[in-house]
């Protein structure tokens, strides 16, 4: 009978722990730690040292932050490269038009000079 009661208590404890959501730990760019969206007024190292049970979540939050920052930097760099490439293409097209106009003018001048030499 005691075993059944112990198993029931363990089962209820497991159900209760499964129903309780895990705390959500996030980190901002300044190293501030937020627990379930609330500022803990702690930096990364202090929070992890004072809350060793949540240290893995802090590690995951830092990893997520680094991944997000890297993705943002890559996206910004690509946008800058694309903008520079389109600007270079526009300048090249304008210069190509100027060169074509100058070549046409040179051709006309050559034709006029050849006609005058006859």
Image: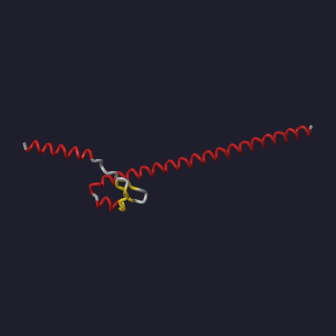
Is residue 25 toward the left or the right of residue 117 in the image? Answer: left
Is residue 98 toward the left or the right of residue 26 in the image? Answer: right
Colour mapping used in the image: secondary structure
Name which residue lies at 29% across and 61% down: 50
Residue 49 lies, with reference to residue 11, above or below; the image says: below
Quarter of image, res 116: top right
Residue reaching furthest to the left:
1
Quadrant in which the N terminus appears: top left
Q: Position of residue 110 (x, y in %)?
A: 84, 40
Is residue 58 toward the left or the right of residue 102 in the image? Answer: left
Q: Position of residue 44 (x, y in %)?
A: 35, 59
Quadrant in which the C terminus appears: top right
Is residue 110 toward the left or the right of residue 71 in the image? Answer: right
Name which residue lies at 71% across and 42% down: 96
Q: Who is closer to the viewer here, 72 or 35? A: 35
Residue 47 lies, with reference to residue 99, above or below; the image says: below
Q: Position of residue 40 (x, y in %)?
A: 35, 60
Q: Position of residue 90 (x, y in %)?
A: 66, 44
Name which residue lies at 60% across and 46% down: 85
Count of labels in the image: 0
Name which residue lies at 10% across and 42% down: 4
Q: Who is closer to the viewer here, 105 or 77? A: 77
Q: Who is closer to the viewer here, 116 or 66? A: 66
């Amino acid at each position: 009978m005691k075993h059944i009661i112990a198993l029931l208590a363990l089962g209820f404890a497991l159900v209760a722990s499964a129903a309780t959501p895990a705390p959500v730990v996030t980190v901002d760019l300044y190293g501030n730690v937020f627990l379930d969206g609330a500022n803990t007024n702690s930096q990364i190292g202090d929070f992890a040292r004072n809350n060793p049970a949540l240290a893995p979540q802090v590690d995951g939050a830092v990893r997520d932050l680094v991944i997000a920052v890297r993705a943002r930097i890559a996206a910004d760099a690509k946008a800058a490269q694309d903008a520079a490439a389109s600007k270079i293409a526009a300048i090249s097209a304008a210069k190509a038009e100027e060169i074509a106009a100058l070549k046409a003018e040179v051709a006309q001048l050559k034709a006029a000079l050849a006609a005058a030499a006859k």
